[in-house]
């Protein structure tokens, strides 16, 4: 299968504002989930659920009225899971160049109509960059296992 990135692009709106006058982080997180879902459901051909969002890194704020671009792509697949890399960019409408504002990895699982996980097509990296991204996803997966073990007493 071809791993075509899914991209959303739009203008940030006044309804996205936080108390500091920038786009609310919660709005960015919603957009990340939406573009991630579009990518995961395209890859799997089925309904998907978010099972993990980790390491969201907000580099710089997004201003109200800026053009926002989200790029998502599959970087690792398990039996039913898909690790999606998401980058968020923005730019002033008068500028041509987008600047990266946020990055994260989000994990989705494909499910059937009963909510039971189902198998997804295997993603195979082809380029050096894709191999690096897959290794990045595997490393984060291993780190999550350690974090989950640390959290068990508190759940």
Image (cartoon, helix red, strand yellow):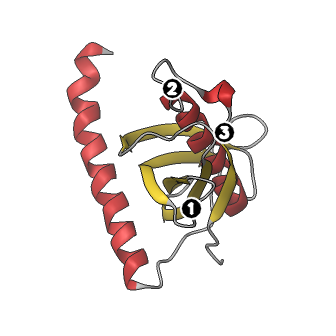
Figure quadrant of residue 11: top right
Residue in front for this viewpoint, 24 or 51: 24
Give the x, y percent position of residue 82: 53, 55
Of mark 3 and mark 2, the one earlier in the sequence is: 2
Nearest-to-viewer mark from 3 and 2: 2
Give the x, y percent position of residue 41: 70, 53
Q: Which residue is mark 1?
A: 95
User: How far apart are labels 3 and 2 at the CA level?
Assistant: 42 Å
Disc 1, disc 2: CB below 8 Å?
no
Question: Is 22 placed left or right of 33 in the picture?
Answer: left
Secondary structure category for the residue under label 1: loop
Nearest-to-viewer mark from 3 and 1: 1
Residue positioned 50% across, 77% down in the render: 124
Q: Residue furthest top?
A: 154
**In this figure, what is the number of numbered marks?**
3
Q: Which residue is mark 2?
A: 21
Dot label at residue 116: 3
Local crowd size for mark 1, using a 10 Å CA cut-off: few (<14), some (14–19), many (≥20): few
User: How far apart are labels 3 and 1 at the CA level?
Assistant: 46 Å
Residue positioned 28% across, 41% down in the render: 145
Of mark 3 and mark 1, the one earlier in the sequence is: 1
């Amino acid at each position: 299968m071809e791993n075509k990135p899914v991209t959303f692009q739009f203008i940030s709106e006044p309804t996205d504002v936080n108390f500091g006058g920038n786009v609310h982080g919660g709005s960015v997180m919603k957009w990340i989930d939406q573009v991630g879902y579009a990518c995961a459901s395209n890859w799997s051909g089925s309904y998907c659920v978010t099972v993990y969002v980790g390491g969201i890194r907000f580099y710089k704020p997004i201003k109200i009225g800026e053009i926002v671009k989200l790029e998502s792509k599959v970087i690792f697949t398990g039996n039913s899971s898909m690790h999606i890399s998401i980058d968020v960019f923005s730019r002033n409408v008068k500028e041509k160049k987008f600047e990266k504002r946020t990055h994260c990895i989000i994990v989705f699982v494909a499910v059937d109509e009963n909510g039971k996980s189902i198998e997804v097509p295997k993603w195979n990296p082809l380029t050096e960059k894709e191999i690096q991204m897959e290794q990045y996803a595997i490393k984060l997966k291993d780190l999550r296992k350690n974090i989950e073990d640390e959290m068990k007493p508190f759940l």
